[in-house]
Amino acid sequence: MGIAISTGTRIAGITATVPSRSVSNREFGNLTDQERDLMIKTLGIENRRIAEDGQSASDLCFIAAERLLDELDWQKNDIDVLIFVTQTPDYITPATSIILQDRLGLPHSCLAFDINLGCSGYIYGISVVNGLLNQLRSGKALLLVGDVSSYCVSEKDKSTAPLFGDAGSATAIEKTGREEDRMVFNLQSDGCGYDHIMIKDGGMRHPVTEESLQDKEYDKNVCRNDLHLILNGIDVFNFSIREVPGNVRTLLQEESLTTDDVDYFIFHQANKLINDTVRKKLHLPEEKVPSTLEEFGNTSSATIPLTIVNTLADIVREQETQMLMAGFGVGLSWGSALVKTDGFVCPPVIET
């Protein structure tokens, strides 16, 4: 797809929800103090929010959506589009978005579907919502993005468990018809790296068997079964630092902008090593690149909206900003978006 340009829509509000349970990486696993210190330094993650048993991504997004609709004073009957981006749905089928349409009390005329994307999902979701709204004479949309990745990792796997936290978000996007309301996207994919981040069993390619449930030890403190998430850290690092800076530069060049023209760069919160390397390759000052890794960890699809709400709420409520958002990871899938905001609803992070 490459570069896509959308005009006549704006972000009206963003909310984010995290579980109230906080887990410290200082208490993770059978590691020495030296190993634990090195892990935390590399990941940049001290604490993670972990869902309670039975608490789903849709639960977190539902709470975020209800709060956002209340803050905006939007009428539920006016919502035309509901998209749910997640890789941890309630069920294999039906689509969780349609369940959320009913749960939120949205009208039957509301278009609803899921998007199965992770780290890049927020960028893709905004692009898809814009495309749909541009087909309508007027319209309002809810983009719900979240994951409970903690359900997918082995607590005995130091390559994944200390990395992931859980979160949900809601973003309200509305059609304005104004040419000055402009968003520009650079979206890319490369399926040859599909196995760099994956859950091997449980789909139709590799259905669940008794063997799927058997734990296997791959290395010291790396033990999991085939229903757990696999993350090849070296390949993901190499992909991220190779592709993301170029993607961002291309987007800026398309709009004849430099990094000085952007107020904030909101990157997917992969880990500190990856994010710092991407930032340095783009020669960005730290103050332009907010982070929530230390407090929340990698919350997969929700990292970008969570970072906006947690670090920039006071600014985006009151000021115009030029943001560049970039998501990258599982798929492999990556993308960036230039979004100019003009003041939008952004309450503090909700805990539940």
Image: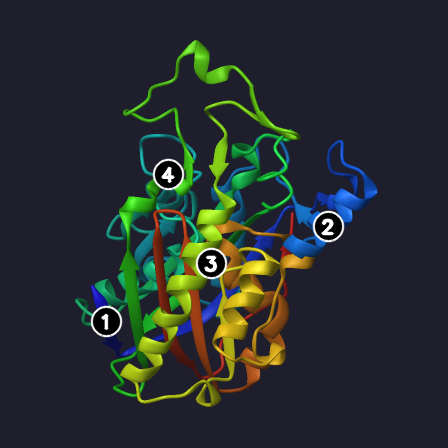
**Residue that carries the numbered disc 3 in the rendered image:** 170
Answer whether residue 206 is visible to the viewer in this image.
Answer: yes
The kind of residue on which mark 2 rests is Leu
Q: Earlier in the sequence, mark 3 or mark 2?
A: 2
Q: Earlier in the sequence, mark 2 or mark 4?
A: 2
Frontmost of labels 4 and 3 is: 4
Contact flag, marks 3 and 1 (Cβ < 8 Å)? no
Frontmost of labels 1 and 4 is: 4
Q: Which mark is residue 38?
A: 2
The kind of residue on which mark 1 rests is Ala
How far is disc 2 from disc 4 in space, using C-alphas? 26 Å
Residue visible at 60% across and 46% down in the picture: 163
How far is disc 1 from disc 4 in space, using C-alphas? 28 Å
Frontmost of labels 1 and 2 is: 2
Q: Is residue 84 above or below residue 240?
A: above
Residue visible at 61% across and 51% down in the picture: 18
Q: Earlier in the sequence, mark 1 or mark 4?
A: 1
